[in-house]
Image (cartoon, rainbow, N blue to C red):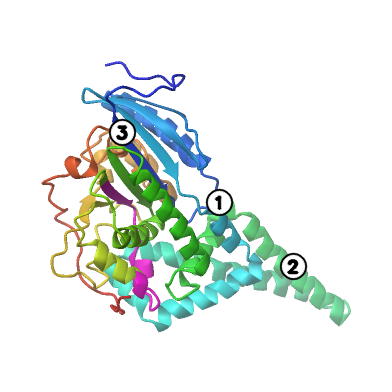
Amino acid sequence: MSVVSDSETDSVAGAFRRHVLYIPGYDPFPPRRYRELYRTEGAAQAAISGYQLAIRPRTGETYGWTVVAGMDGRAVETEVEVLVWSDLVKGSMDRGILGTYGQLARTAWLYLSSGALFRLIRLRKGPMIAALYPAVLLVVQAIVALAAGGLVLWLARALPWGLGWLMTLLAGWAVLEGFRRLDHRLFVYYLMHDYAFTTVEGGAYPAVLEDRLAVFRGRVRAALGSGVDEVLVVGHSSGVHLGVSLLADLIREGVPGCPALGFLSLGQAVPMVSYLPGAARLRGDLAYLSTREELTWVDVTAPGDGCSFALCDPVAVSGVAPEGQRWPLILSAAFTQTLSPEKWQTLKRRYFRLHFQYLCAFDRPGDYDYFRITAGPLTLAERFRGRKPSASRITTPLSPFQDVA
């Protein structure tokens, strides 16, 4: 069938219309990177799967793009809007070397003293190795800096006492600064800031983030009133627990019965927050959202993604699963099956790239296809109606805190 090209701007008559609101994870980069990722990976998936898909600029005050597609004999138009909080992320990362070590001490103390760390290790070892990585590397960097300073102090032992110690301090600081400048390759400071942001209020949302969630809620409500066939909220990584809370608040306020409302959570690490003592608000939102008929919630992870709590039901493992729990539907992206052996060999050691694979093309796609979900003619509810959850899902309630707000 024919599909609107990138250069055309008129709506396709009779097209299925969708509004996607994408919530990134803890990411300081501008939202245009997600447009480019969608453009390149969408084109690759369309070529593999044999459908048509293109993007064009989107008008409006918020950042996004328009997707025009032809799938299963029907035209589809999707407005993709990025719910931006990268400015808050960048602000939280401006801590310097000493500030980052202070974050390390505070974060480690909270996870250890609360008992959350050992419960999380029992739940899934993979993401906890990722969580311990920045802590261990920061300690190693400090040891290297101390060793360098000690060496300089020994070499400068014949110099005046004050000058020798000054050179020692400068040498140690130079080592730490060198490691910090290499962080675009090591991701040590980035991950430390990520985990520290979660623990600023002991697991509760900081006031600036609550304010931003209120803005996001307004954008979702505007989409619900725009006349589309489906409003789909997509949360990735840290964006998942933000999506849980904004949708819980939205439904408490009341939502119309039409259009269809969907929530697609990808690569979630919800227990990293919900296991903390101050996360009663999130635990209450998880319990509330899990029973609602107003939406369809599908949670997709993969055991190959070491940065997510793969196949963990975020409601159940947080110890707040209520009677009559409906959501989320836990599915596996099964990277070892949906990626060819050649591609899997290329990606399996690229841990951060794998964490974004949910947003990318699969060369052996299964029933999870990000572009069919976001640009296809079926709602999330229709696409996964009757689908059983993964047989390997984890529901053991290990959270040390199970109070809700």
Residue 341 at x, y = what percent?
Answer: 29, 38
**Lower position in the chain sequence, tag 2 or tag 3:** 3
Rendered position, 9 above or below 168? above
Between 89 and 147, the one lying in front of the other is 89
Residue 318 at x, y = what percent?
Answer: 27, 70
Label 1 to label 2, Cα distance in Å? 22 Å
Which residue bears the numbered disc 2?
171
Left or right: residue 279 compared with residue 212 = left
Between 344 and 215, the one lying in front of the other is 215
Residue 62 at x, y = what percent?
Answer: 50, 43
Which label sits on residue 22? none
The residue sitting at 71% across, 68% down in the picture is: 173
In the rendered image, is residue 184 in sight? yes
Left or right: residue 238 compared with residue 158 = left
Q: Secondary structure at mark 1?
A: helix
Left or right: residue 366 compared with residue 308 = left
Residue 266 located within the stretch drawn in magenta: yes
Which residue bears the numbered disc 3?
17
The kind of residue on which mark 2 rests is: Ala
**Lower position in the chain sequence, tag 1 or tag 2:** 2
The kind of residue on which mark 1 rests is: Arg
Label 2 to label 3, Cα distance in Å? 60 Å
Residue 238 at x, y = what percent?
Answer: 41, 58
Which residue bears the numbered disc 1?
185
Residue furthest bottom as drawn:
113
Label 1 to label 3, Cα distance in Å? 40 Å
Q: Nearer the viewer, mark 1 or mark 3?
A: 3
**Lower position in the chain sequence, tag 1 or tag 3:** 3
Rendered position, 112 above or below 304? below
The residue segment tinted magenta is 261-281
